[in-house]
Amino acid sequence: MIKNQIISKLKFIKPVILNILFLVSFILLLTCTRNKNITSSENLPPEPSWPKQEWLLIGLESEEIKSIGIHPTKPNIILAGTYFNFSAQKPAKLFRSEDYGVTWDTLAVDETYGYQDFIFNPDNPDIVYAVGGVRLLQSNNIGKSWVDITGSIRTNWETFTSCMAFNPMNSNEVYAGTCGFFGGELYKSFNMGKTWECITKNITNTSITDIVVDPRIPDILYFSMDMDGDVWKSENSGRSWKQTALRGTGVMTHDLLIDLSKPNILYAALSRTEYYGDKIDFGIMKTMDGGKTWKHFNNGLPDHFQAFHIVKNYRNGDLFTVTSFGNNGEIYKMKNTSGRWEKFGINSVSTNFYYCPLSFSPNFRYLYFGCKGVYVIQL
């Protein structure tokens, strides 16, 4: 009798399982079909085999590279921008490569503050934004052509667009910051940049250097500042703000990194130096509680430096930072388990106060670096 009951139940369960498997398969097939134009690697040129442990110059050696943007699903397409060298009267330029950086096309020449960064739309990365200078640019064809979407964002000869970030769960919501000698603001758009509204009107001396959004709770976002180096936090999508414990540093916070796997962990890249006998002991700072407390994160770094960028390899958890002191600087790596920074690369590359971006390939196999030209290294 028990055997008959088991057989009866199995007859009932089997079609249910089959229906579930069919439904899951259908959803996966539908998802793949919808994303075929984004995720397919068909017609991509073969990926070069760049050297390990050694930086290789791959192009634009006469240019001062300020930013590097790599398409998230078409890594052969790379964008690069320079800054406006006022002293040498060299205009800012925008470049595009379709073969992993082997050859480059010049897209634009613009006498602005330069191209600070490239931001790809998380839902459709063929839509990309170029941040920097007095204009905010948008391209719907991965950089082949551009339109100005600055709109009501206030810029002038000394106030320029400096950073940008998407709500990772709603690409209609996007933030853009401005920076300048006399301040800047943070702006928000609810329609992918068609219109903008200022969301930092009640904060004085605002000059935005970077923005990051919590990938799990996008109502939480942070921005960093020039001048006094403050890091601010909002828990309601920018309707109100409060200072984190990192404030009044006296030096610029150049860069923010929010850990996508543990968003309560953030890193801030500042200066660590000495001016006229006054030691500024910040450098790279880390918080593990969403900004309530911060601690120094400089083990292995020199006594005097400016930290400009900090990035994480999500394939293995390693961190990288680029530092500069005058025209001398290094790229450092902290292995996931070491707790100590070490110089990275068997050959040195020069860093500069005005330009030195780091950018991973989408699979985190390669790290690109911009200085006098574009360099790459296999990780």
Image (cartoon, helix red, strand yellow):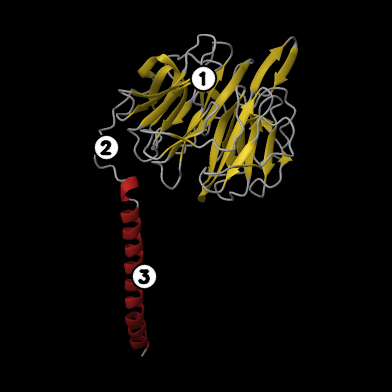
Spatial separation of the CA atoms under disc 1 and disc 2: 30 Å
The residue to which callout 3 is attached is: 20
Residue 225 picture quarter: top right
Lateral position of residue 47 relative to residue 80, left or right: left
Identity of the amino acid at label 2? Leu
From this view, report whether residue 10 is shown above or below residue 133. Answer: below
Secondary structure found at label 1: loop
Label 2 Cα crowd, 10 Å radius (few <14 / some 14-19 / many 20+): few
Identity of the amino acid at label 3? Ile
From this view, report whether residue 113 is shown above or below residue 189. Answer: above
Question: Residue 279's x, y, as percent?
Answer: 73, 16
- Of 87 and 230, which appears nearest the observer? 87
From this view, report whether residue 60 is shown above or below residue 172. Answer: above
Spatial separation of the CA atoms under disc 1 and disc 3: 53 Å
Label 3 Cα crowd, 10 Å radius (few <14 / some 14-19 / many 20+): few
The residue to which callout 2 is attached is: 44
The residue to which callout 1 is attached is: 355
Foreground mark, 1 or 3?
1
From this view, report whether residue 138 is shown above or below residue 21. Answer: above
Question: Residue 256's x, y, as percent?
Answer: 59, 33
Residue at image point 56% right, 50% down: 216
Label 1 Cα crowd, 10 Å radius (few <14 / some 14-19 / many 20+): many
Secondary structure found at label 3: helix
Residue at image point 28% right, 42% down: 41
Q: Earlier in the sequence, mark 1 or mark 3?
A: 3
